[in-house]
Image: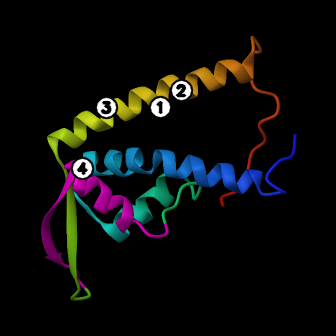
Amino acid sequence: MELNKGNSSPGMEDNLKKAVTEMVVLSLLDGEDMYANQITQSLEKYSDGAVSIVFPYSALYRLISAGYIWEAYKKTAPDGRRRQYYQITEQGREYLGELQDVYTRFTGGVDRVLLRGEDKIRWIKPHSAI
């Protein structure tokens, strides 16, 4: 079987990021209202650099369009710029719960396949931040 011409690992990472972006953004907003740059910084901080979103607005606009978040208010930052804060809706909280259930069920199934009765996954190596 031919892999993506040496591009399978980055391609897989891109697909995983796309699949979990809405969940992690909603999770952050479930904790506090945030502006776009704060969301990207928080993702990188809490994931030790493993998760990043270069352009968060496409995810934010999708979530707004679906009714999961809304543009709550604007605040002036210390540097004088106005920042748009986003807030999760009740519908967004319900959707987040559904996403977390699917994610937990799916990753648990993947872990069971990888473990196949072993105590731990032997092939996982520590990695540096991306």
Circles 3 and 1: CB atoms closer than 8 Å: no
Circles 1 and 2: CB atoms closer than 8 Å: yes
Mark 3 and mark 1: Cα distance apart in space: 10 Å
Q: Amino acid at mark 2?
A: Phe
Q: Earlier in the sequence, mark 3 or mark 1?
A: 3
Q: Which mark is residue 66?
A: 4
Left or right: 119 in relation to 70: right
Circles 4 and 3: CB atoms closer than 8 Å: no
- Region of the chain picked out in magenta, as a range: 54-78
Mark 4 and mark 3: Cα distance apart in space: 15 Å
Q: Earlier in the sequence, mark 2 or mark 4?
A: 4
Label 2, secondary structure: give it: helix
| Residue 34 to residue 109: above or below | below
Q: Which mark is residue 106?
A: 2
Viewer-closest of 127 and 12 = 12
Residue bearing mark 3: 97
Quadrant where the image shows the C terminus: bottom right
Q: Residue furthest right?
A: 1
Residue bearing mark 1: 103
Mark toward the viewer: 4 or 3: 4
Left or right: 45 in relation to 70: right
